Structures are given as C-alpha cells and as structure tokens.
Amino acid sequence: TLSDRLGAALSGLRGKGRLSEADIDTTAREIRIALLEADVALPVVRAFIARIKERAKGAEVSEALNPAQQVVKIVNEELISVLGGETRRIALAKEPPSVIMLAGLQGSGKTTLAGKLARWLKGQGHTPLLVACDLQRPNAVNQLQIVGERAGVVTFAPEPGNGVGDPVDVARRGVAHACDKMYDIVIVDTAGRLGVDAELMQQASDIRDAVRPDETLFVVDAMIGQDAVTTAEAFRDGVGFTGVVLTKLDGDARGGAALSVREVTGQPILFASNGEKLEDFDVFHPDRMASRILGMGDLLTLIEQAEQVFDAEKAQVTADKIGSGELTLEDFLDQMLAIRKMGPIGNILGMLPGANSAQMKEALAQVDDKQLDKLQAIIRGMTPAERDNPKIINGSRRLRIANGSGVQVSDVNDLVNRFFEARKQMKQMAGQFGFGGAAARRV
Ligand code: GDP
Ligand code: MG
C-alpha cells in the first residue's frame, strides 16, 4: 500500500525548517502512483501533482510529522478541497415544483438513483414525483415504477399500448401533472446508451429544454475509471449538468473517477451511491473520498492524532518539569485536554491492558467525564500566576476561584491537594524510571 511504500522510502527522516526538494519528489512519486492506481486520469494526476509540489515547497516542517507525513497531509487537504470541500446541497426552485433531471450512460444507475433520491427527499418532508422518460428499453418504465413503489412515491408514465412514446412529451406532461397535483419535486429519469452518441445527447437536451431543470445530475459509475473523463466531457458539452452523482462505490473502485470528473468539469459531486438497495445512498463526503483515493485512511487518522496529541517539544518540557517537580496546573490542564481529545476518558482507560479485571472495572466505573469537566472549570477559573505557582492559592483565592467556576470551596481544596500529592508522586516515579530533568533530554 501507499503507506508502506512511503514508510519505507522516508522512515526515520525528521527535519526542521522546510521540506527538501528530494523529500517532496520522493513522496510525490508515490502519491502519483497511488492516484493512477485509483484510476485518476493521467492529465488530472499531472496537474494535481504539480499543484502539490508547489504548495509543499513553501511548507514548514511541523514538529509532529516527518516529511512524508507532511506531504501526505498536504495532498489530503488538497484532495478534499478539489473534491469540493463542503458538500453542496441540492438546489431547489423558489416556486415548486423543482425539477431534477438525471443523465448518464445506460447502466450507470440513473433509475436506481431516481428511487434513492425520491426516498431521501420524501424523508425530508418533500413530495416527489418520478417521471419515466426512458422509452428506449422495453422494461425501463416498469423498472422505474417498481423502484417508485419501494420508495413509496408515485411514478408518472406514458399510457401503455400507444407504441413508442415521445420522451420529451412525457417529460413536459409529467411536470404539468406535478403542478396540478402539488408534487413539489419532479425527478426525471432518462434513457442512456452504452456509449456516448449524438442521438442520446440530442434527446437529453430536448428533454432539458422542455422541463428546464433546476438541477441536472450527471450519474456516473465509479467503476468505469479512466473513461469517466471522456464521458463527463461528452455530457458537459452535449447536455450540460450542474452536479455529479457517483454510483457503485460499494465495488472495488478506488474512486479516482470522482477526482477526474470534478477536475475536468468543475461541477460538484452531490451524492454517492453504494449499493443496489434504496438506502445505499448518502450525500457525498469529500474527506471520505480523499482517504479512499489515497487508500490510506489509517495513516491519515494517525497523522491527525499525531498532530493533536503529540507535540514533541511540549511533551519534553513537561517531562522535564515532572522530573524536577516543577509541574504547574497549566501543564496539568494541557495534559488533561490532550488526553480528552482522544475520546471519553472511560474509553481510553478501557483500552489499557488489564482493563477487564474486576478491580479495573470498578475503578473505571468511578471515572467520570463530568468530574473532569469540573477540574477543567476550576483550573480555568485561576489566574495564570496561580496556575504557574499553585502554592500562592490561599483561602481568599480559593473562595474567588470557587465562585468564579461555580463549585464549592471544598472542590478547589480537593483539586489543589490532589495536585500537590500527584506532583510529588510523579517526581518520585520519574526518578525511579530514570527520566525527567537532564536525563529526559536523551528520550
Ligand atoms: P440506468 O441504466 O442508468 O438506469 O441504471 P440502473 O439504475 O438500471 O442500474 C443498473 C444496474 O446497476 C442495476 O442492476 C442496479 O441494481 C445496479 N446499481 C445501481 N446503483 C448501484 C450501486 O450504487 N451499487 C451497486 N452495486 N449496484 C448499483
Ligand atoms: Mg434506467
């Protein structure tokens, strides 16, 4: 995997100052392979890598990350931003009905999506109407009706037995029907071909002109990989679209199609489909897609944690202070906040070895995030001087702190006493294990 390759290439490097050209090149090469393996189209990869290199050149090396991790972080951020950053919501008309038209190749998942969208919109209190404008395949209308029934919505379809109908006419009548019966959203399912062709594009643009959609969604199968670019370009030029839906993400596609389509057309990805059932559907999440494309969700999580929790310099200073018995309440608060970022305190302790013993279970039951909230509030209520040198916290200060943080004076007493006790014990332990003070600098 990419993480392994990067790890092997750059393990042990930890720099200060700026990322070196060589670090950037090595990492960029691996990222390039990862993107190509994820089926991102070559020109898109080239443009993307060039941007990454540019940005990495100016980047400071962080204390917490090695250069490879640093570049991966930049790549990840850039991917998320290229994939759209925030999810764009579907655009609805000021005056209902809103019209959503689906376009794409045959088999891309349009009809299935029509049902998924209808179900999702219905769940939000809308009253969608499906309109069957795929009159190309014998079974297409029936398929939409079945999907509609599952979603619990009505399907508008041409009357059977009139020969091949005109999809443009059906679309127009469908929207009129929606106006009549007060449906507030019309979802227009259209025909596709196995490949891009002029007749298909003409029909789609005729339907578009007849119903003037508020949103035209280009539906694309994530599994088609590199072909996504040419298909997207053809639909952009032939019909035009305002948003993209990726389907079949439950397959083993790495999602490169997302990046390619987004880069080439500049249109946002609105939804993602990941299965045949109507509920296998979600709004599109750029961050999830980015880690899928990089194929390194775990590494990204690690990088995040490293940045949040691991601040080498700070940890060093703290270790020194523990060793020399100079730990302040400020440090204590910092430590507590760092640990809390990792989740509820009970969860963290629960992961420690021995967490299943009866003794440990009892201890865990007493650990209480509310208690920690209280400690935090008390320390926040102290002045910097008091945090720095808790010895000055006399009776009148204790009363002020208690009032300021909404607790009893006895709570403040408790905290201060326990802090002094802990500091003493930690100092002893530090001596025992040979860290702290000057010795800590070797760690
Ligand atoms: P259309 O020709 O564009 O209308 O595509 P369909 O909606 O008929 O879908 C074609 C096939 O793909 C059907 O067998 C669907 O069940 C299947 N399909 C659609 N979306 C998904 C998806 O997200 N995941 C999977 N695994 N199959 C899908
Ligand atoms: Mg269909």
Image (cartoon, helix red, strand yellow):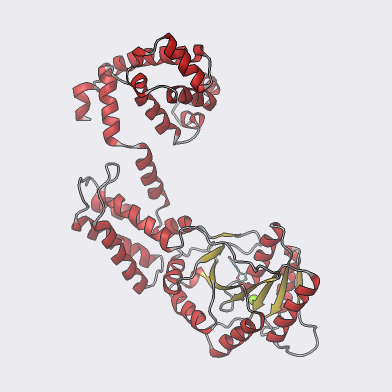
Quadrant where the N terminus sits is bottom left
Residue 162: x and y in percent read 79, 89
Residue situated in front as seen by the camera: 114 or 94: 94
Would residue 296 be seen by someone viewing this image from the given angle?
yes
59 relative to 293 in the view: left or right: left
Q: 220 or 355, which is in the foreground?
A: 220
Q: Residue at x 49, y 83 (%)?
A: 237
Looking at the image, residue 24 lies above or below residue 351: below
Quadrant of the rendered image containing residue 142: bottom right
Asked if 306 appears above or below 115 in the picture, the reply is: above
Marker count (numbered): 0
Q: Could you tell me which residue is drawn at 50 percent across and 79 percent down?
A: 236
Q: Position of residue 412 (x, y in %)?
A: 47, 15
Quarter of the picture containing the C terminus is top left
**229 over 86 or under it: above or below:** below
Task: Give residue 240's position: percent from left, percent from top.
Answer: 53, 79
Tell me where residue 209 sits by quadrant.
bottom right
Q: Is residue 356 visible?
A: no
Viewed as shown, does residue 171 lie left or right of 201? right
Residue 132, quarter of the rendered image:
bottom right
Residue ID at (58%, 86%)? 200
